[in-house]
Image: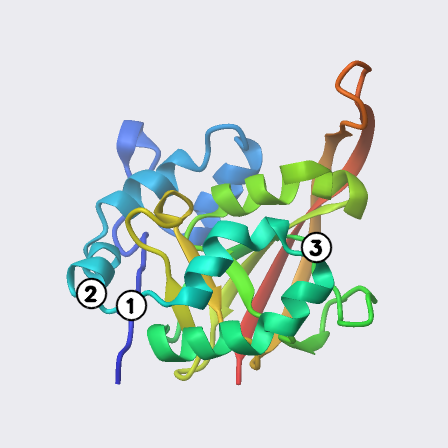
């Protein structure tokens, strides 16, 4: 069985400049308070993490047309086009991906809603009705949530810490020349995501540019931290 070894960034304390960060919870708390540069800890640790590098050294992932299509054109797809291709993308992940280790921590940001658009609350369970884009680091997830005014349109920004709770969750990890700078992991649709806790950290000013010649629209939206798990 092709399985990705657990990428645990804090199996040993991160003590650069005496910071003494020894857990994901401490690192995430630091990230909340240092949004503009707090992700550098995760980048540094991932770039030196042996299990993470071995994903590519062992060539445990392969490429396919649909994953390349996802990588190059995802943001250009209209919703109906993407929905028509979910099954093909899932098939590509099944063929080219690997199983995640139980206990793996990943991050997603933006907003999480049911297929009918209703919000998820603490205790909610939702089946992943489409592949889910995640990252080994909170920084690219957070930045993607701001991209193209998504946080403004969603009237919130949610950073979601996801813990894998089953042995049979299939995913594809992008490597060199793909989305490696985002530490991208795309999870195959099908398993359930369970919302365990929601906490509002603060409010953040976001913008929406309608016309480059005029001042962008501005709004203060809640920045929420969500703890969730994925299991079959």
Rendered location of residue 215, percent (x, y): 81, 16
Q: Nearer the viewer, mark 2 or mark 3?
A: 2
Alpha-carbon span between mark 2 and mark 1: 7 Å
Dot 1 surroundings within 10 Å: few (below 14), some, or many (20 or more)? some
Coloring basis for residues: rainbow
Taking the spot 33% from the left edge, 65% from the top edge, the residue there is 63
Alpha-carbon span between mark 2 and mark 3: 33 Å
Name the element at disc 1.
Answer: loop
Name the element at disc 2.
Answer: loop
Dot 3 surroundings within 10 Å: few (below 14), some, or many (20 or more)? some
Rendered location of residue 118, percent (x, y): 83, 67
What quarter of the picture does the N terminus occupy? bottom left
Taking the spot 82% from the left edge, 15% from the top edge, the residue there is 214
Residue labelled with disc 3: 111
The numbered disc on residue 59 is: 2
Rendered location of residue 58, percent (x, y): 16, 65
* Labelled pair 2, 1 in contact (Cβ < 8 Å): yes
* Labelled pair 2, 3 in contact (Cβ < 8 Å): no
Name the element at disc 3.
Answer: loop
For residue 126, say whether it is visible.
yes
Dot 2 surroundings within 10 Å: few (below 14), some, or many (20 or more)? few
Q: Nearer the viewer, mark 1 or mark 3?
A: 1
- The outermost residue toward the left is 57
Q: Nearer the viewer, residue 32 or 131?
A: 131
In-image side of 173 versus 50 (left or right): right
Residue labelled with disc 1: 62
Rendered location of residue 160, percent (x, y): 59, 56
Label 2 vs 3, first from the N-terminus:
2
In-image side of 155 versus 187 (left or right): right
Q: Nearer the viewer, residue 56 or 219?
A: 56
Alpha-carbon span between mark 1 and mark 3: 30 Å
Q: Is residue 6 above or below residue 73?
A: below
């Amino acid at each position: 069985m092709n399985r990705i070894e657990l990428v645990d960034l804090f199996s040993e304390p991160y003590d650069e400049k005496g910071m003494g960060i020894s857990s994901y919870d401490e690192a995430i708390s630091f990230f909340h308070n240092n949004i503009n540069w707090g992700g550098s800890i995760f980048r540094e640790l991932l770039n030196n993490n042996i299990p993470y590098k071995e994903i590519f050294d062992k060539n445990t992932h392969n490429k396919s047309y649909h994953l390349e299509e996802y990588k190059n054109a995802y943001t250009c797809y209209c919703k109906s086009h993407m929905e028509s291709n979910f099954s093909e993308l899932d098939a590509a992940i099944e063929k080219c991906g690997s199983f995640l280790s139980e206990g793996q921590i990943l991050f997603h940001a933006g907003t999480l809603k049911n297929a009918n658009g209703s919000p998820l609350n603490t205790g909610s369970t939702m089946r992943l009705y489409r592949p889910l884009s995640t990252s080994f680091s909170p920084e690219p997830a957070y930045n993607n949530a701001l991209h193209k005014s998504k946080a403004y349109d969603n009237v919130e920004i949610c950073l979601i810490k996801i813990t894998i709770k089953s042995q049979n969750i299939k995913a594809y990890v992008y490597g060199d020349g793909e989305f490696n700078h985002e530490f991208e992991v795309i999870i195959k649709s099908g398993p359930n995501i369970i919302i365990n806790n929601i906490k509002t950290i603060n409010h953040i000013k976001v913008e929406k540019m309608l016309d480059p010649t005029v001042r962008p629209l501005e709004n203060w939206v809640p920045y929420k931290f969500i703890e969730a798990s994925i299991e079959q």
